[in-house]
């Protein structure tokens, strides 16, 4: 082995041309790899040869030789040989075979760039051909060389992203007639909705195409696309910590190259171009803001917008809603006669339950106050003091049976999260009453909550009419008690005119109601700011993550969209 190693070192490497090393198809690359891949430190004793394999970081020579060997075999179309240069031969061979067989990429040229430590960038170019249609393809990728623990052998650390940077575990590259024809989405009045004009709708339009492409009457084109596997789970959402799971871009198939365009079918949505434009404008002026506008009388979604155009927090987010949850809690207390709008109701500085001590913002208190004054000021302790009179599942039942939340049965037309109000006990149950604990919502859910409060009946929000695909919309088990609804309406109107929402809602109109909220999140210096309100037959809810108190950070956003909406 020692002689073979010394002989191999005299071989020249592929020439450096224009800053990259062009991989040469043939034996040279393979010989270069064998020089480094087979080298071991040897100790010879009278009893035989004991081999001690290399340990520690891979060397620059090993990185270069391993990358060249892998790229040479891949470029030459030998998936088996290329896979042998990786630490997962089965997965690598499957992916590299599919690169040509399923993605129909030929005339492949791979050009290695300079290495940075154990990572090597390279350029991929080729031609995608399918049923007489072809187009050139070019993109950049990278690989990382690792040392295998059992024998010290340097190998390409296999990841699907080596083949293409958009590939995740379980994904595949496919070129064929696109499974879903393109869709021309239009608003309620027939105006076309495009990502160029409404950036927040990018993932929504992808979702509409995936669900309604075939139903809308279009014909599919030919595309190279990433087909998502089982790992692309749309249920991986923001966990409330402010950190999202997979973005919505990673839950839908992604088109990489269009060889021929399909013919789009027209799909009418419930969106309002005017309201959507206002929502886009307002969230665009803020960091990490999301808003949804719906029509309470029908449940139609008029707008959904996010500052960030990756994960769709407006429809899929999972965040603690803070004091906006007090709308649900208040409806429950009113129905149970544990509160009445103008009866005295405690709002102390502190209230304890289940071993936790709760307090109000800035530790305020209302002496000799009523439930009206406590709700309008968003007094936390006014709700915590009632925890001892409730069963653990009371709030969950109210959320599910009256507000249609947390049953995972909404069907709005694209992926959505339907809220979560789990049964909890002790301090967590008390925290749930004020929108903390395990309660999770997004602007869609909260806009639905205030709409249910306004009309007294839950109407599932939707983006596409159920008439398009004969789907069944979710319903709630019962209406809100008439007396409780009358009082709840008055509470929301009073809050919007004389309470914590009044400053933001000034000048919005006469038929208004609203509720502020803020939600503490571990690791954040500022809470998430929430605000929900209605004007006439428009209802909106928004969150500004790390925005601070909702009346200041989020109220102006909601008010501006309600003013502009139609």
Image: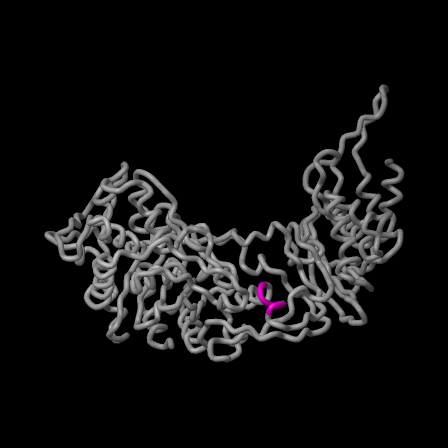
Residue 399 x %, y %: 35, 51
Residue 480 visible (yes or no): yes
Whether 566 is drawn above or below 463: the answer is below
Name which residue lies at 63% across and 71% down: 182
Point out the stretch of residues depicted in magenta. 211-215
Residue 526 visible (yes or no): no
Name which residue lies at 26% across and 56% down: 481
Residue 273 x %, y %: 46, 77
Residue 97 x %, y %: 79, 53
Q: Quadrant of residue 497?
A: bottom left
Whether 195 is drawn above or below 59: the answer is below
Residue 143 on the magenta segment:
no
Residue 278 x %, y %: 41, 75
Residue that extends furthest to the top in the rendered view of this protein: 47
**Camera-side residue of 564 and 55:** 564
Location of the N terminus by quadrant is top right
Q: Relative to 31, is 445 on the left or the right?
A: left
Name which residue lies at 50% across and 80% down: 191
Give the dominant element type of the magenta stretch: helix, strand or loop: loop
Q: Quadrant of residue 386?
A: top left
**Camera-side residue of 136 and 250:** 250
């Amino acid at each position: 082995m020692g002689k073979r190693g010394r002989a191999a070192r005299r071989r020249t490497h592929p020439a450096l041309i224009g800053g990259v090393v062009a991989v040469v198809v043939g034996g040279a690359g393979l010989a270069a790899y064998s020089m480094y891949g087979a080298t071991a430190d040897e100790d010879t004793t009278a009893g035989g040869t004991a081999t001690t394999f290399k340990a520690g970081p891979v060397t620059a020579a090993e990185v270069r030789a391993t990358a060249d060997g892998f790229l040479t075999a891949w470029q030459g179309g030998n998936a088996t040989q290329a896979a042998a240069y990786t630490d997962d031969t089965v997965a690598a061979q499957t992916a590299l075979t599919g690169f040509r067989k399923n993605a129909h990429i030929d005339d492949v040229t791979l050009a290695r760039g300079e290495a940075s430590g154990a990572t090597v960038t390279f350029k991929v170019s080729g031609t995608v051909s399918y049923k007489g249609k072809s187009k050139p393809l070019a993109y950049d990728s990278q690989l990382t060389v690792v040392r295998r623990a059992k024998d010290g052998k340097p190998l390409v650390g296999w990841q699907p992203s080596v083949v293409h940077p958009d590939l995740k575990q379980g994904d595949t590259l496919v070129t064929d007639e696109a499974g879903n024809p393109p869709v021309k989405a239009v608003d309620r009045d027939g105006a076309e909705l495009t990502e160029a004009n409404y950036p927040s709708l990018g993932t929504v339009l992808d979702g509409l195409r995936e669900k309604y492409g075939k139903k809308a009457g279009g014909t599919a084109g030919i595309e190279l696309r990433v087909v998502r596997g089982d790992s692309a789970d749309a249920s991986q959402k923001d966990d409330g910590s402010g950190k999202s799971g997979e973005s919505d871009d990673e839950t839908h198939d992604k088109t990489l190259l269009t060889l021929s365009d399909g013919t789009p079918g027209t799909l009418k949505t419930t969106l309002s171009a005017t309201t959507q434009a206002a929502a886009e404008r307002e969230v665009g002026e803020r960091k990490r803001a999301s808003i949804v506008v719906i029509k309470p009388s029908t449940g139609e979604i008029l707008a959904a917008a996010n500052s960030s155009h990756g994960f769709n927090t407006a429809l899929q987010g999972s965040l603690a809603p803070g004091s906006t949850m007090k709308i649900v809690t208040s409806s429950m207390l009113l129905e149970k006669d544990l509160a009445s709008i103008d009866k005295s109701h405690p709002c102390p500085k502190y209230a304890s339950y289940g071993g936790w001590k709760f307090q109000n913002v800035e530790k305020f208190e209302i002496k000799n106050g009523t439930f009206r004054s406590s709700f309008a000021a968003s007094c936390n302790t006014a709700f915590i003091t009632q925890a001892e009179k409730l069963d653990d599942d009371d709030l969950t039942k109210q959320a599910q049976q009256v507000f249609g939340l947390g049953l995972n049965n909404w069907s709005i037309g694209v992926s959505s999260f339907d809220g979560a109000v789990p049964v909890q006990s002790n301090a967590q149950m008390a925290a749930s009453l004020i929108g903390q604990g395990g309660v999770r919502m997004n602007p869609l859910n909260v806009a639905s909550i205030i709409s249910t409060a306004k009309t007294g009946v839950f109407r599932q929000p939707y983006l596409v009419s159920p008439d398009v695909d004969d789907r069944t919309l979710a319903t709630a088990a019962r209406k809100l008690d008439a007396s409780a609804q009358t009082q709840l309406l008055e509470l929301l109107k009073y809050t919007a005119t004389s309470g914590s929402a009044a400053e933001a809602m000034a000048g919005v109109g006469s038929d208004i109601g609203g509720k502020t909220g803020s939600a503490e999140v571990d690791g954040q210096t500022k809470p998430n700011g929430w605000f929900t309100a209605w004007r006439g037959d428009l209802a909106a809810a928004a969150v500004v993550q790390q925005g601070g108190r909702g009346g200041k950070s989020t109220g102006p956003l909601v008010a501006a969209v309600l003013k502009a909406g139609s």
